[in-house]
Each structure stands twice: as structure tokens, then as C-alpha cells.
């Protein structure tokens, strides 16, 4: 093998390694959970914060928040861009991915940013202290 052939092979190997690394880095699980159906007991310490407007918790891939208008919101917690966990921004009544500034409405619709689509919205119902989140 001469020097030119060696450098050519080295370049192909380096490019392959780089591509594999990039593909692995971009393969975060950013899919929304399906068939969601769980209950949160707001009377327990773990979920009592959901009685205060502006607070949120993340359970089973779903971010559940109490808006400042006392409405329970539930959307997928992974940003569709790169799977980073979103946060609830109560002052604007919206969800935001702080990694790349994708912004979503209270129903999960995409407002801005690199996210290719919105967050999946889930239904909520409150009976006494039991908050049910479901598809």
C-alpha cells in the first residue's frame, strides 16, 4: 500500500467513525408515549405541588402542569427536536425546550424553534384528589 492509498483509507475510516458518532448522538428517544393512562394522587407529597398554579411534574414521559388559570395540562415531555426534556413556563402559559429554545403552546402546538412538530397532548380529569392523565 502506498502513501496515497493509506491516506485515502484513513480518510474513509475517519469519516465512517464521525458519521456513526453523529448518528448515535442524534438517536435520542424523542417519541411521545402512546396509550397513556395513569393517576396522580394530589394528596401525597410526591404530587401535592400540582395544587399550586405554575408547578409541574414529569411522570412516565409526560409533563403535567397546573396553569395559572387552574387548568391541568399534560403533554409529552421530550422535545421532538432532540429529545431534551421540556419545562413549563407558567408566566407565559407555555412549554419550552431550553436546549435550543423551541416553544410550544399550553396544548403542545409548536410556536417556534427547531422542533419539527408539536408535543403530543393528553387529556386530564380531576376527581377529588385524583388526577387522571390519559390518551
Image (tube, rainbow, N blue to C red):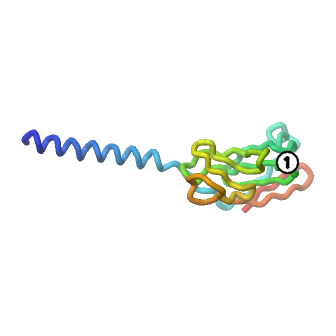
Question: What is the quadrant of residue 117 in the picture?
Answer: bottom right
For image coordinates 87% across by 55% down, the residue present is 126
Where is residue 82? Give x, y as percent: 54, 49
Q: Nearer the viewer, residue 42 or 22?
A: 22
Where is residue 36? Give x, y as percent: 70, 58
For image coordinates 69% across by 57% down, the residue present is 108
Q: Quadrant of the C terminus?
A: bottom right
From what the image shows, is residue 103 above or below residue 14?
below
Question: What is the quadrant of residue 58 in the picture?
Answer: top right
Residue farthest to the left, as pictured: 2
Q: Nearer the viewer, residue 117 or 120?
A: 117
Q: Quadrant of the N terminus?
A: top left
For image coordinates 62% across by 54% down, the residue present is 112
Secondary structure, mark 1, is loop
From what the image shows, is residue 58 above or below residue 116?
above
Left or right for 1, reference 70: left
Q: Nearer the viewer, residue 101 or 67?
A: 101
Residue topped by disc 1:
68
Left or right for 133, reference 51: left
Residue farthest to the right, as pictured: 128
Amino acid at each position: 500500500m502506498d502513501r496515497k492509498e493509506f491516506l485515502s483509507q484513513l480518510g474513509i475510516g475517519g469519516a465512517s467513525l464521525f458519521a456513526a458518532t453523529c448518528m448515535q448522538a442524534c438517536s435520542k428517544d424523542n417519541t411521545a408515549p402512546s396509550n397513556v393512562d395513569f393517576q396522580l394522587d394530589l394528596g401525597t407529597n410526591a404530587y401535592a405541588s400540582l395544587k399550586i398554579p405554575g408547578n409541574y411534574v414529569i411522570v412516565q414521559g409526560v409533563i403535567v402542569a397546573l396553569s395559572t388559570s387552574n387548568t391541568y395540562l399534560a403533554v409529552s415531555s421530550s422535545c421532538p427536536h432532540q429529545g431534551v426534556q421540556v419545562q413549563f413556563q407558567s408566566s407565559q402559559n407555555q412549554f419550552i425546550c431550553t436546549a435550543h429554545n423551541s416553544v410550544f403552546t399550553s396544548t403542545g402546538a409548536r410556536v417556534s424553534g427547531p422542533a419539527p412538530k408539536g408535543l403530543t397532548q393528553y387529556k386530564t380529569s380531576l376527581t377529588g384528589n385524583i388526577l387522571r392523565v390519559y390518551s
